[in-house]
Image: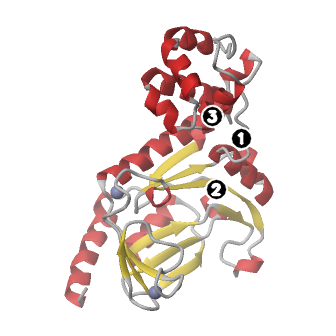
Amino acid sequence: MNQKSYNFIRSFFSEYYRRHYSPEAPSKMEKREFGFSLFEGIMLRHKSISNPEELKNFLEASTPMDAYYSCAYYESPTAEMDRKGWLGADLIFDVDADHIPTRCDKVHDEWVCSSCGFVGKGVTPEKCPICYGEKFNVTTWPCETCLESAKAETIKLLDMLMDDFGFSDKEINVFFSGHRGYHVQIESETILSLDATARKEIVDYVTGLGFNAEPLESAQRIFCGWGKRSHVGVLEFIRKAEESDLRKIGIKRNAAKAIIQNKNVLLEKWASGAWWGVKGVGPETIRRLMEH
Ligand SMILES: [Zn+2]
Ligand SMILES: [Zn+2]
């Protein structure tokens, strides 16, 4: 972009900050680090801003193209990184279509190997097939399918955060990430001081890592968390499934036949949490359904 274009865009940013922008400040903003990338190509970091008014004044005066604040809280936000004095942090989830398998197969994206220049379309490989290089320049396109998939996953995540973890909607903020997804931010006293291990545990739960697809004997456990989620998922799948769908996920021919023939009885029984009692549909079949 040439200087003239930069100036043109900058004038619109300036106009926006002066006339239309009213800052929505994050909680405890005086304890956060702010950063700004300027049109002049400079990144300003380690800034402290104590109130929304000050933020607006700063944006008007320096017209940055991007503004950031840390999800961590610090004793001295303006100090160097190792001297800031970490006090706690919000919990942030980054939901991005880049990491969600989609129908479009990302055919609209193009990657170029930084080492040998080999070009490909679709999901960026871990290693270049020609030179095994691991660095790529990627040009992405936010297609409708990608954006929809990110939105659907974000909604699932929000349900989980509210139903399973009990966060209220007041504690949760959702922002468009600027790419192909959303940032979900939780500002809550209860998670503030959680260490890295505890945060990892939460992520593992949310992604279902370590989830054991055992059919549950107790009907109670189908009313919350992953128990409920897999239960609802199985019922929905069965409702629409044909014999070939069942075969595709590895269910044996006889069991698949039994499920289709007894679909209505099964759905009724399973809806109340009774997994047993249909001839030919054993625990192994149910486990396969749940894993699917
Ligand atoms: Zn290469
Ligand atoms: Zn796409």
The picture places residue 51, in percent across and down from the top left corner, at 55, 60
Query: Is 169 rendered above or below residue 234?
Result: below
Mark 3–mark 2 Cα distance, whole angstroms, equals 47 Å
Ligand 2 within 8 Å, label 1 CB: no
**Residue for point 56% across, 42% down:** 157
Residue 284 figure quarter: top right
Q: Quadrant of the N terminus?
A: bottom left
Report helix, strand or loop for mark 2: loop
Query: Is residue 236 toward the left or the right of residue 11 in the image?
Result: right
Kind of element beneath mark 1: loop
Mark 3 CB within 8 Å of ligand 2:
no
Q: Position of residue 270 (x, y in %)?
A: 61, 15
- Whether the residue carrying mark 2 lies under 8 Å from ligand 2 is answered with no
Which mark is first along the chain, 1 or 2? Answer: 2
Q: Is residue 271 left or right of residue 21?
A: right
Q: Which residue is mark 3?
A: 288
> Of the residues shown, which amino acid type is indicated by label 3?
Arg
Residue indicated by mark 1: 211
The three-letter code of the residue at mark 2 reads Lys
